[in-house]
Image (tube, rainbow, N blue to C red):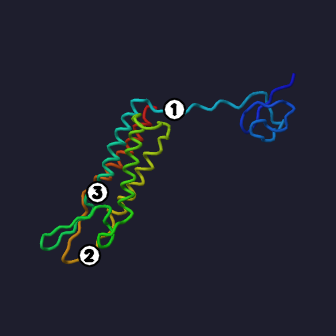
Amino acid sequence: MQAMLYCQACGSEAHDKDKNCPVCMTKIDHSLQTQDPLPELPSVKTSTPENDVLAGTFCLVGGALVAVGSFLPYVVATTVFGISISRNAFQLGQNLSMTYDGPLILVAGLLLVFRGLNLKGTLGSKQLGTWSPIWISILAALVVLSSWLSTFPVSPAVTFSRGYGGIVSLVGALSGFVAVYIRRRNS
């Protein structure tokens, strides 16, 4: 009877006479062989269903806040005559031209909404990974901060202030971070 060996690369069984693993074709070094397979890897902890629903709710609400915040005033310009003009995240370019900020913030918000629905079990597989809300939230927060905290032109006749759209979007992005924390807690 031939002794069973195990591949050092993939752990599958190979016969003593095999020179290469029958599964991954890696050369089998018979001098390194023990008669034991590779040790079992620890199982990956998954979140509890209650945590998934709560995290999904935070993602859903946070995504809605990020998306809605992109349409709210990011910058408010007030003249000495008291006339105010506001611009949302889509209108941050010169002469009301569209910038990349608005679409990126809106897409990040919609992705958080999708992930929230996914975690709540109403859309797709929950196995997309716990990382997705954090990366989407980081993207949203960075774009919001880069556009919202940019310098304003200096003019004696006009004063510029930051609108509340950026705050709403940042609170939404923060909800994505909270969702990741909830999912990883007690898992």
Residue occupying image coordinates x 31% and y 65%: 91
Task: Work out how far the residue at label 1 is from the one at label 2, CA to CA, in angstroms.
Answer: 54 Å
The residue wearing badge 1 is 45
In what quadrant of the picture does the N terminus appear?
top right
Residue occupying image coordinates x 71% and y 37%: 10
The x and y percentages for residue 186 are 43, 31
Which quadrant would residue 96 be assigned to in this image?
A: bottom left
Q: Secondary structure at mark 1?
A: loop
Q: Secondary structure at mark 3?
A: loop
The x and y percentages for residue 182 are 39, 37
The residue wearing badge 2 is 154
Give the camera-side residue of 98 and 13.
98
Residue occupying image coordinates x 47% and y 41%: 130
Residue occupying image coordinates x 79% and y 31%: 14
Position of residue 161 relative to residue 38, above or below, is below
Position of residue 104 relative to residue 62, above or below, is below
In screen coordinates, is 130 left or right of 5? left
Task: Work out how far the residue at label 1 is from the one at label 3, CA to CA, in angstroms.
Answer: 39 Å
Give the camera-side residue of 172 and 149.
172
